[in-house]
Amino acid sequence: MTARKPLILVVNDDGITAPGIRFLIKVMNQLGEVWVVAPDGPQSGMGHAITLESTLRCEPITIDNGPQKEFACSGTPVDCVKLAVNCILPRRPDLIVSGVNHGSNSSINVIYSGTMSAAVEGAMERIPSVGFSLLDYSWDADFAPFEKHIFKIAQTVMRSGLPMGTCLNVNIPKKSDTPVKGIKVCRQAIANWEEEFDERVDPRGRKYYWLTGTFKNYDNGEDTDEWALANNFISVVPVDIDLTAKHAIGILNQLDFEVPH
Amino acid sequence: MTARKPLILVVNDDGITAPGIRFLIKVMNQLGEVWVVAPDGPQSGMGHAITLESTLRCEPITIDNGPQKEFACSGTPVDCVKLAVNCILPRRPDLIVSGVNHGSNSSINVIYSGTMSAAVEGAMERIPSVGFSLLDYSWDADFAPFEKHIFKIAQTVMRSGLPMGTCLNVNIPKKSDTPVKGIKVCRQAIANWEEEFDERVDPRGRKYYWLTGTFKNYDNGEDTDEWALANNFISVVPVDIDLTAKHAIGILNQLDFEVPH
């Protein structure tokens, strides 16, 4: 009897042709039987959006000559995971990997990120799931120096599993002259975006806006993902699908919410 | 010197004309100076999506003869909050309320909900924020029996504030013959959606899908929002913007992620 190869679902939010997912597919082909179900175009910043108001398309596609099976989906990254697990894959995957994202999903970005929401959806389905992001927005970013780290993290997660209801948010420093120092398990830094809307006027005289902004890290802790990345470590943050602010329950129980009879 | 009225931002995900937000505006008009910045159409299930790939419109609009100021926005609920706070409101709001959503956002639904993502964005901006949802999907749902509860919760949050980095997820049982028993501070129940994609064929012979599913509560705890709602209480869950699974850090630190040199 031959051991069956593990089944790995690959998804992303930059779209199925993005260099980051093409790289991740190649690395995962060394670990198992790879199925790709990814958006047919860019879905950055889609967070945990799902498609309720319109229909979904999901069609087989061939992009390179690798052994993986691939499907391009009209929906969001979370739609891709739901469609893959329920309609496309031959069985439940042993691992879901999302990315490699072109740009950071550290700190508060986890909440906006389609890449990470795909991993969160995997955790909701109780499948070990990891989102990978490289701190380089360039389409020509060099992922190669991090191949062995991505391989090792995926392999470890597949072998050991993850605590139920959690997935991993892995961020990788931009390639530099010094190799990464290693991998640090971190907490999410307390940070924020200071928005700066770019207000413009269209050719018909009507106002419109582009969303832009500046990332501000307020957190001086040395146990955060921002600290790890600034110090040339790969950051690994466990992400919880239970959003309850448990520390706040006692505080809220002291407030008077009741309406007098 | 007259005390300045508190400034309240009202947002939702069902769109600016939905009965749920029209009701919420009326209640908030009793509490402060109300500004509405809400989507110009349905944005259910948009989660924490933001608009990065296209432009945003945001135009003044008059829908009824109330004292509130209103703006319809082409973007998601989170876009509405960002635009409101940065471009539209005359000063920082004292309170953000989102809803009243037509349908439940209890348990795991908090992650998919545009209504709740607007409140989460408020918490990220360090503004006291509450999302309200009624467990009735009908457009003709009766919100009136819950007016005094919504008023009291909003008033209490505005007076007392909320623990930093948290907002409230308030769910209200559907109107029934027995009045609600009161308000319970809860944790998010561990639950899931079992997807059932509705696969169809279009007039040109190509497959497409509609996302549907069944909500499954696996959590028998009597401290959950699902328990409270099933027992005719209004549930109040504090939601954390820090997604770190703190209990998982020690477990992950035992795993071997390092690549041998």
Image (cartoon, coloured by chain):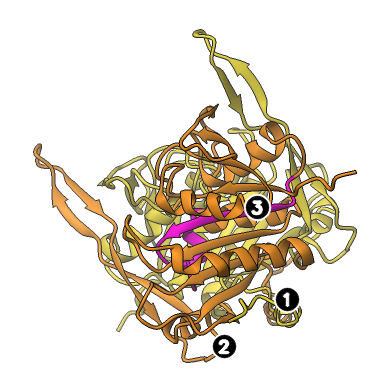
Chain colours: A orange, B yellow
Q: How crowded is the residue under tag 1: few (<14 C-alpha within 10 Å), some, or many (20+)?
A: many
Q: Position of residue B187 (x, y in %)?
A: 75, 67
Q: Amino acid at mark 2?
A: Asp
Q: How crowded is the residue under tag 2: few (<14 C-alpha within 10 Å), some, or many (20+)?
A: some
Q: Earlier in the sequence, mark 2 or mark 3?
A: 3
Residue denoted by label 3: A96
Which residue is painted at 15% across and 43% down in the image? A206
Please check whether the numbered discs 2 and 3 fall on a single chain. yes
Residue numbers of the magenta segment: A93-114
Which residue is painted at 58% across and 52% down in the image? A118
Note whether B18 is above or below B69 in the view shown. Answer: above
Name the chain letter of the residue that bears numbered label 3.
A
Q: Position of residue A162 (x, y in %)?
A: 75, 66
Which residue is painted at 36% across and 77% down in the image? A176
Residue A31 visible, this orientation: yes
Whether residues under marks 1 and 3 lie with C-beta atoms below 8 angstroms apart, the answer is no
Label 1 and label 2: CA atoms lie apart by: 14 Å
Question: B221 or B69: which is nearer to us?
Answer: B221
Q: Amino acid at mark 1?
A: Ala
Residue B26 visible, this orientation: no
Q: Quadrant of residue A92?
A: top right
Question: B5 or B121: which is nearer to us?
Answer: B121
Q: Position of residue A189 (x, y in %)?
A: 51, 80
Q: How crowded is the residue under tag 3: few (<14 C-alpha within 10 Å), some, or many (20+)?
A: many
Name the element at disc 3.
strand
Residue denoted by label 2: A223
Residue denoted by label 1: B248
Name the element at disc 2.
loop
The N terminus of chain A is located in which quarter? Answer: top right
Name the chain letter of the residue that bears numbered label 2.
A
